[in-house]
Amino acid sequence: MNFKNIILGILLLFTLTLSAQENLFIETKAVIKSIETKRSGRKSKDIATVSFVTQKGDSIETVVELLRIPFVGNLKNVNDEITIKYNAENPALVETNSGNFISQYGIYILILLGLIFSLSTYLKARKQTS
């Protein structure tokens, strides 16, 4: 065995152990305490400070990123209740369902929109050549 194969074997084992670690996320309700809009160039983020109670009874306050619709903003206000998932081992690690949806299906939505716009452009060009 050469050195390259040993390194590849170690990396493979390392990735298998990382994928084997499952983080248990618990779903609960949180109340929005404040919302702050952060701008960086043309991009904007809405960061909400939320508070919730864990299953153990601990009161936690942390921040989450809210779903922001272009030209509209977010649809949540202070004192609104949102559904979150927090890490059982570290309750300060929180994710929202809307953010989870975007991270899971966002690329598919972009591909679909690209196909739709490309198809309409293709049909217009084909119509003009006929």
Image: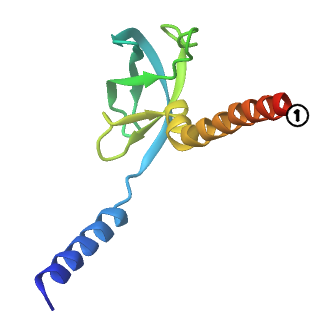
- Camera-side residue: 37 or 24? 37
Total numbered labels: 1
The quadrant the N terminus occupies is bottom left
Query: Dot 1: few (<14), some (14–19), or many (≥20) neighbours within 10 Å?
Result: few
- Quadrant of the rendered structure where residue 98 is? top right
- The amino acid beneath tag 1 is Ser
The residue closer to the viewer here, 64 or 69, is 69
Seen in the picture, residue 39 relative to 116 is either above or below; the reply is: above
In this picture, residue 14 sits left or right of residue 109: left
- Quadrant of the image containing the C terminus: top right
Extreme-left residue of the structure: 3
Residue tagged by mark 1?
130
> Seen from this angle, which residue lies furthest right?
130
Task: Determine the secondary structure under disc 1.
Answer: loop
Occupied quadrant, residue 87: top left
Residue occupying the point 16% across, 76% down: 7
Q: Position of residue 84 (x, y in %)?
A: 48, 32
86 up-or-down from 53: above or below: below
- Report the side of 112 relative to 37 (left or right): right
